[in-house]
Image (cartoon, helix red, strand yellow):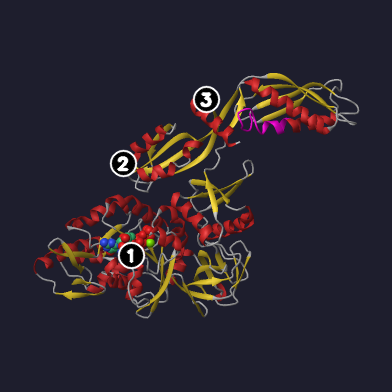
Amino acid sequence: MAANGNNGTRATGPRAVALVGPFQSGKTTLLEAILSRTGVIQRQGAVEAGNTVGDATKEARHHRMSVELTVATTTFMGDSYTFLDCPGSVEFVHDMRAVLPAIDAAIVVCEMDEKKVPQLQLILRELEEQKIPRILFVNKIDKADAGVHDLLKLLQPASRTKLVLRQIPTFSGDLITGFVDLALERAFVYKEHAPSQVVPLEGELADREKTARFSMLETLADHDDELMEQLLEDIQPPRDKVFDDLTRELREGLVSPVLLGTAIRANGVLRLMKALRHESPGIAETAKRLGVKAGGGDAVAYVLKTLSTAHGGKMSVARVLAGQAGDGTTFLSSSGDETGRVAGVFKLVGQNSEKRGPAAVGEVVALAKLDKAKTGDTLTAGKAPHAQVAKVEPYAPVLAIAISAKERKDDVKLGQALNKLAEEDPSITIVHNPETHEVVLWGQGEMHLRVATERLSDRFGVAIERRQPTVGYRETIRKGTTQRGRHKKQSGGHGQFGDVVLEIKPLPRGSGFQFEEQITGGVVPRNYIPSVEEGVIDALKHGPLGFPVVDLHVALIDGSYHTVDSSDMAFRTAGRIGISEGLPQCQPVLLEPIHLVEIVCPSEATAKINALMSGRRGQILGFDTREGWDGWDVVRAKMPEAEIGDLIVEIRSATAGAGTFTFKFDHMAELTGRTADQIVAARRAAE
Ligand SMILES: Nc1nc2c(ncn2[C@@H]2O[C@H](COP(=O)(O)OP(=O)(O)OP(=O)(O)O)[C@@H](O)[C@H]2O)c(=O)[nH]1
Ligand SMILES: [Mg+2]
């Protein structure tokens, strides 16, 4: 198939490009290099020195890693580019996932590091599924050795699309000192913080170049018959044709080019920018990919991140997918709700926001005061809602902590802060446990929750205390009994009198609580019976072991009353006494929640995961290959809730961060012996 007329024509208009990749691969450093190369900043800062444009929040600086998205807009050769520097840590992956629908292309920053290949695979998977063009940037070439020859062998397994090596490194001894661009057929030596210098391509290097170029062309020819013929007939394809093919095949998702560089020295950055400029699609193609309907010129925008500014204002970082968005634009969400009226359009460069005029199609800006807009919303200024261009559900949380305000007076403030926290980061879930009165914060991992609590104090001014959340233990009985509950009080004038006989019987697991009345002859008057049941329920909230009691049947079989002294209160008390005195005779036993756990992990970690599960009282149900995932397994097990607490921490450490799990309540199981005794003792001590 010959290149058609559109191919090779440069996309125009503003671009949105995400910097993604495994943890610590150098994305934020690369952003810094791009900003310095494009003149936004005078000097390139370093993550180590804590002076980069990205990661400028207190939490990011403190942990020396990206803990949220950084947005920075710059200009290169007359075009506007917004870079979205995404955190690499899997715990903050939602910030990346929410960004992806809005971008024209992704730069996947990676390293020559075998350990990081599974993570790379996860990221490429997301991009492949969303059909987002992607360029791999192999960073830290300064640290790579001669093994870099095997670059594709290492990286290809992570990608389902064919990788094409666009550049080969050149060496001086063991050090990589430059590269040959295989499309341009030109050799360069790296200069620190300056454009690379062209050097003659000759001798042994020219031979290496020929071989590498041929294999690049072979890959491209898989999707271009004309090129295939030229290669077979030993005809040199024209350079323009090669560029056209690179462009078309990148945009159509047939190949992913691989470029090299060293972000800390800004090496390889200009070539990367040029590849973006010439080869990445623009907003027209992206809007098509997303199915944007630009009816009547109304603005359509996608919200990729929500920020709470220091002064409490809300900003929706959005990409304009059609029309233009300016002050006064009123938006509707996909569900037809008014999200508010734009009051301020800002250009972002990290923490720096600069007021500007209306945003044109393709631009990424922060829109102020869209009070009801949420991350992931598709907004339209039209009369009818626009279909959601993408639906990004956060991953189910995997780790929880219980939190409370350090000072009681901050309780209300904490509630408000939690709302803002969840608005900024939808991968956090806040659950109020009505039984224990705990506020439980669910998140994606230890660091995620740590940063969340830091934000609560740094950004929203609420100091908090954190605890392990209470495990949902219950207790039940193993045998039945019949017990009288009698409440009699003669205090001055009016006395209190209630008298009941309760028959208590165990029920099968999962039955809950049943109450039945079997009163004959009106020994307990009808109107008092609901109060007896209430008294029973009161007592069941706190059984002899200290936990809520479940799976039992209580029948009211007998009793007596007094015409003057009996009352609802008295019968409620009698019911409660009957249960409290009866249960200890029923062989109470502890119940613990057991969950069905499903772990996904790279196969080389499966044995470790099995051992880990068995070590935590897990019952392995089996393991399988993960469908559609070469080199991955799924392990299924049943596991007590108490052991799941920090399971994610262990899974991540056994899988270089790539493994994860989901869980679902399965059943309550009896727990006896030492573990049970310890739990009961701890409960008593806590009371
Ligand atoms: N040797 C070398 N080190 C680099 C290079 N680029 C980044 N680093 C170092 O790698 C570490 C991580 O850099 P970052 O830029 O924070 O990486 P990142 O991908 O943004 O990290 P996360 O966002 O936390 O995933 C820092 O210590 C950098 O100084 C490079 O080109 N060469
Ligand atoms: Mg970073």
In magenta, the rendered stretch is: 536-550
The rendered magenta stretch, by its main secondary structure, is classed as loop
Q: Residues within 10 Å of mark 3 (few under 14, many from 20)?
A: few
Disc 2 to disc 1, how far (Cα)?
Answer: 32 Å
Q: Is residue 363 visible in the rendered structure shown here?
A: no
Residue, disc 3: 672
Q: Nearer the viewer, mark 2 or mark 1?
A: 2
Instruction: Classify 601 as above or below 141.
Output: above
Name the residue type under label 3: Thr
Residue visible at 33% across and 36% down in the picture: 607
Residue, disc 2: 604
Which element carries disc 1, helix, strand or loop? helix
Location of residue 618 (image quadrant): top left
Q: Is residue 2 left or right of residue 300?
A: left
Residue, disc 1: 250
Residue 642, percent from left and from top: 50, 36
Name the residue type under label 1: Leu
In the picture, the quarter occupied by the N terminus is bottom left
* Pointers 2 and 3 in contact (C-beta within 8 Å): no
